[in-house]
Image: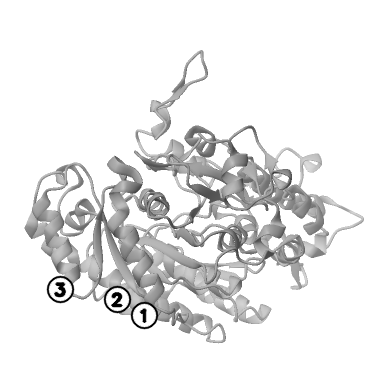
Amino acid sequence: MRPATEVAAELGINNDDLELYGKYKAKVPLFYKKKKPRFDNPKLILVSAISPTPAGEGKTTVSIGLSQALNRINKQATVVLREPSLGPVFGIKGGATGGGYSQVIPMEDINLHFTGDFAAIEKAHNLLSALIDNNIQSKNRSLNLDPRTISWKRVMDMNDRSLRNVVVGLGGTASGVPRETGFDITAASEVMAILCLSDDIRDLKKRLGNIFIGYTVDKKPVYARNLNAHGAMAALLKDAIKPNLVQTIEGTPALIHGGPFANIAQGTNSIIATKTSLALSEYTITEAGFGFDLGAEKFLDIKCRVADVAPNVVVLVATVRALKYHGGMPLKELKTPNIEALKKGIENLQKHIENIKLFNLAPIVAINKFETDMQKELDFIKDYCLNTGVPVSVADVWAKGGEGAIELAEIVVEKAASCYSMFKPLYDLGDSVENKIEIISRNIYGAEAVDYTVKAKANLNKIHDLGLDGLAICMAKTQKSLSDNPKLLGRPKDFIITVREIEIAAGAGFLIPITGDIMRMPGLPEIPASEKIDIDEEGIISGLF
């Protein structure tokens, strides 16, 4: 590994400005994002994916490999990623630092605690939770909060289904007022969303103050600012708001910051990290979680509006195994060649390509190569893309690093230079909440209609009464299907999206319609990845992937 100071120098960052966390990790001051760009017309490349298998399709790996490939062809590129959550690390997916010869390092540090950003977000979130219960208990400074209306939960960075619904305040009058509440995972915290959408400390404090808590007994809305919580919360985040600088396995600069999931939150890294890279780099490669229907839609409809940025092109990651999975093959058989399954599953790729074009953006397909892929299967996908006029390249980045994505990098450079972004968001913020949800559901997912439960309809009335109709939409939906039913693979049709409830994230600036059976506190699988993780007497960690 190169020292962080050496990586920083490549980006024009003064060593005296770095806040070092050991030799290989550092935080970058906020003022770098406001510097005049070092390169004329810097390019923003968004990497997304088709609907994944449970193990994921290597979107982060391709992002890292592409950034390494761009540097190999003498372009200055930085990869900008989200921070891993301990939930997936110890759950089913493992870490989120790429793989093989396309990783960000030090991998163990990044996957386990890193620079403490998640811990700071967790503490800031739970400080507000403690202040809420303290105010309910208070006799002299009470806001007269109605405990039944409080929507603010607690968070923890771990998959723990038993904490989804809890009762607090048991143990007598000295231990608080009993009420029902629960836990979300830290990646789904509104504080995480706010951190990733804030422009600076001032904006961070304002957004934290706008967090909606609930109502008083006489039906008046209460926000975090009414508890004077936002100043202390922002103080806890004074370091977490700064992006983290590390490197890839080939020494390419990497900014890693923020970590919201895409199936239950907005799924993109921070605006601060992205803008910092745009100021310092010729090419900024960034990813949006899960399929294009989730992370990328939110990147474009939420993040791009707030940050006033737009990608030049979109790289869509596809894999042979995912397309066979969407063609009906069981997970255990995906290593077996099957062109017929590919033919059926290719409709999933087709829909994601169509979705990219809905935003007036140019798609490029990157086929992330696995060692079990047969050449005839790769050729089938390539021929399909070329016949539909979409540039395509096989990316062998796990095995070969940047060398395995040279062709992809050359296509990206060509298309980014020739395709002037005509990006437009999918919906108007001024549309009704129902109309915004319907536009996403019909156009992106392919739904026939949207249905609302009684609770969701009550939420709509509350949103209207609070005057929050103009907020953006952040759908919480399964990543396994374009629909809200994980069993509907491929390109499902004639289905209805069911909105179960709608959570308010007024500080982040969006509403969260929760669809199907999606949970904002995931559970561990039967055999969690944590069972394979160990550390020896020399401090060497094994089993982390």
Q: Quadrant of residue 144?
A: bottom right
User: Are the residues at dot 2 and dot 1 in contact (C-beta closer than 8 Å)?
Assistant: yes
Type of the residue with mark 3: Asn
Cα–Cα span, label 2 and label 1: 6 Å
Instruction: Name the residue nearer the viewer: 286 or 342.
Output: 286
Give x and y (percent) for residue 265.
Answer: 51, 60
Question: In the displayed structure, does residue 154 sit left or right of residue 293?
Answer: right
Instruction: Determine the secondary structure under disc 1.
Output: helix
Q: Which residue is mark 3?
A: 387
**Can you see residue 463?**
yes
Query: Looking at the rendering, in which quadrant would you find the C terminus?
Result: top left
Q: Nearer the viewer, mark 2 or mark 3?
A: 3
Q: Residue at x 85, y 58 (%)?
A: 142
The label shown at residue 358 is 1
Question: Gap between marks 1 and 3, in whole Å?
Answer: 20 Å
Q: Earlier in the sequence, mark 1 or mark 3?
A: 1
